[in-house]
Image (spheres, helix red, strand yellow):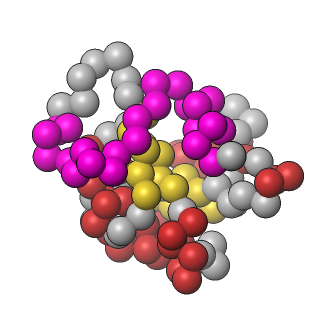
Amino acid sequence: MTEKNLKIALISNHPNHQTIENMLKKHDLAIYFNYIMTSAKYGKRKPDPDIFLFTLEKMGLKNHANSVIVCGDEYADIIGAQRANLQSILLERKYKFPFEKEINISNLRKISNISEILDVIE
């Protein structure tokens, strides 16, 4: 992703920020993220749009929100992104997304495998 000059953040509702950082390091995934934010660190949980907007600001993307894509597999991810006026993509799991009817479907893209995100950003 770096050859495309993309910035990637992880926003998690996990109650312990250090656990997320440790897990990413343990599995050699931390190198793929420019920024890691958790609700434990920020003090608000998704779907509150503030955690998304704060992360954009920290990444220097506050004035480039139209070029940001949020990919998530939970209600809080998609609703939070929509509340922050960000493009969102639902990563569908095998089970039915339980709150799909509450989401603005007209502009919701869906993928079934995370590798499909590459088709979206190209």
Residue nearest the observer in this picture, 117 or 28: 117
Identify which residue is drawn at 38% across, 28% down: 92
Q: Which residues are magenta?
A: 99-121
Q: Is residue 40 left or right of residue 104?
A: right
Identify which residue is drawn at 58% across, 31% down: 116
Identify which residue is drawn at 25% across, 45% down: 105
The image shows residue 59, relative to residue 93, as above or below, that is below
Give the quarter of the image for residue 80. Answer: bottom left
Q: Is residue 16 left or right of residue 78?
A: right
Residue furthest out toward the right: 3
* Residue 21 appears in the figure: yes
Image coordinates of residue 59 in percent, x first then y, are: 63, 73
Residue furthest out toward the bottom: 63
What's the magenta bit mostly, secondary-structure-wise?
helix
Q: Is residue 20 left or right of residue 22?
A: left
Magenta residue check for 79? no
* Residue 40 appears in the figure: no
Identify which residue is drawn at 51% across, 72% down: 65
Image coordinates of residue 56 in percent, x first then y, are: 53, 72
Magenta residue check for 112? yes
Residue furthest out toward the left: 101
The image shows residue 97, relative to residue 60, as above or below, that is above
The image shows residue 119, relative to residue 79, as above or below, that is above
Number of numbered discs on residues? 0
Q: Is residue 60 left or right of residue 79?
A: right
Give the quarter of the image for residue 100. Answer: top left
Image coordinates of residue 45 in percent, x first then y, are: 31, 60
Give the quarter of the image for residue 83. Answer: bottom left
